Image (spheres, grey):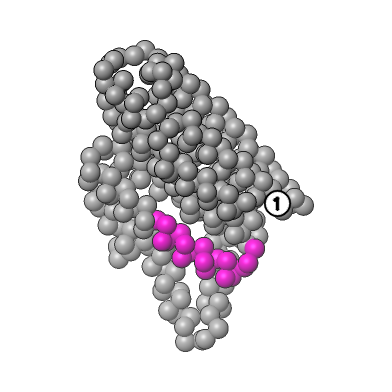
Amino acid sequence: MIFIVTISMLIVTNAQDLILAGVALECQSLLLYVIISMKRYSNLAVEAAARYFMAGAFSACLMLLGISVIYLSTGSTDLARVSIILHECENLPKLYLSVVLLLAGFLFKFALAPLQFWIADVYQGSYGYFASYMAMVTKLPTLVLFVKCMIYIWLGILYMDSLIKLVAVFSLIISCLYMVRELNFKRFWAISSISHMSYIVLAFSLGDYQGVATGILYLFIYLISTLGIWTIILRMKKNPSHDITLTEFFTRLPRLSVIKNHQNILTLFVVFLFLSAAGIPPGVGFIPKFLLF
């Protein structure tokens, strides 16, 4: 199933047709629902899958409805052709409706505010390896499709960039307020991903090469930090429990190394990864945030 999910991601990344991208995106989502609920004797896992399914189905309906409105307005779902038609026929009334529907669907997929309510429960109820997989790669194809829609469709729409910036800043504030009182590791990392996606979307919404380069750099550093931290977590517990806390993580960290002399090196490595994820010097995650501002 993970293999088919990966193939679906590649199709979404390379698709130039909105219908093909939507079908591949839903193929990816349907298998993720099944993967999350494979631990069927866990109430949290089943609840997480059900919550993810309801949120994903609703976002899919919004995105497909937005694609349908684009087809009604332009007679095509090919991004290049849609872009040409929209530049020839400006101020199409139906276009604004499609923009709102597509943007709402992307907000669900990215778990950006005010549609972020599902992500913490889904991460908490997921199996350890699948939670790390979701944290690292599942949002990449959706982000690529988001950038394509922005370049081909949204850049010429008045106030669209301002709307995306406003959503990103609002999501950033909401995620910071949630993280202050969160101690569960999986839920903490899920909420922190909202702030990271906010920065990435904010960078891409600038609409120039510098913004895109900054967003790609931020995404790359975020993936490396996530990979390192989840590798440590999975080394600590092959199947991290639903209730593993940040306190437990840092308490057990010095006992992970087989060679006693490597304990301090491992601890410093994890601290560096957390500083990088938080964007605090000397962590490399500070660089894209500095460039963005």
Q: What secondary structure predominates along the stretch shown in magenta?
A: helix
Q: Which residue is rendered at x = 42% and y = 61% of the image? A: 225
Q: Is residue 230 magenta?
A: yes
Lateral position of residue 62 relative to residue 271, left or right: right
Residue 179 seen by the camera? no
Highlighted range, magenta: 222-239
Q: Nearer the viewer, residue 14 or 273?
A: 14
- Residue 42, image x, y percentages: 74, 52
In the picture of the structure, the residue carrying the numbered disc 1 is 38
Helix, strand or loop under label 1: loop
Among the 4 quarters of the image, the one containing residue 169: top left
Q: Is residue 284 above or below residue 219?
A: below
Q: Which residue is rendered at x = 42% and y = 57% of the image? A: 223
Q: Is residue 228 magenta?
A: yes
Identity of the residue furthest to the right in this view: 41
- Residue 92, image x, y percentages: 34, 14
- Residue 251, image x, y percentages: 55, 71
Q: Nearer the viewer, residue 10 or 26?
A: 10
Determine crowd level at label 1: few under 14, some 14-19, many 20+ residues with C-alpha closer than 10 A: some
Q: Nearer the viewer, residue 187 or 251?
A: 187
Lateral position of residue 27 relative to residue 50, left or right: left
Residue 242 seen by the camera? yes
Q: Amino acid at mark 1?
A: Met
- Residue 148, image x, y percentages: 36, 36
Q: Which residue is rendered at x = 46% and y = 76% of the image? A: 266
Q: Which residue is rendered at x = 41% and y = 61% of the image? A: 224
Identity of the residue furthest to the top in this view: 93
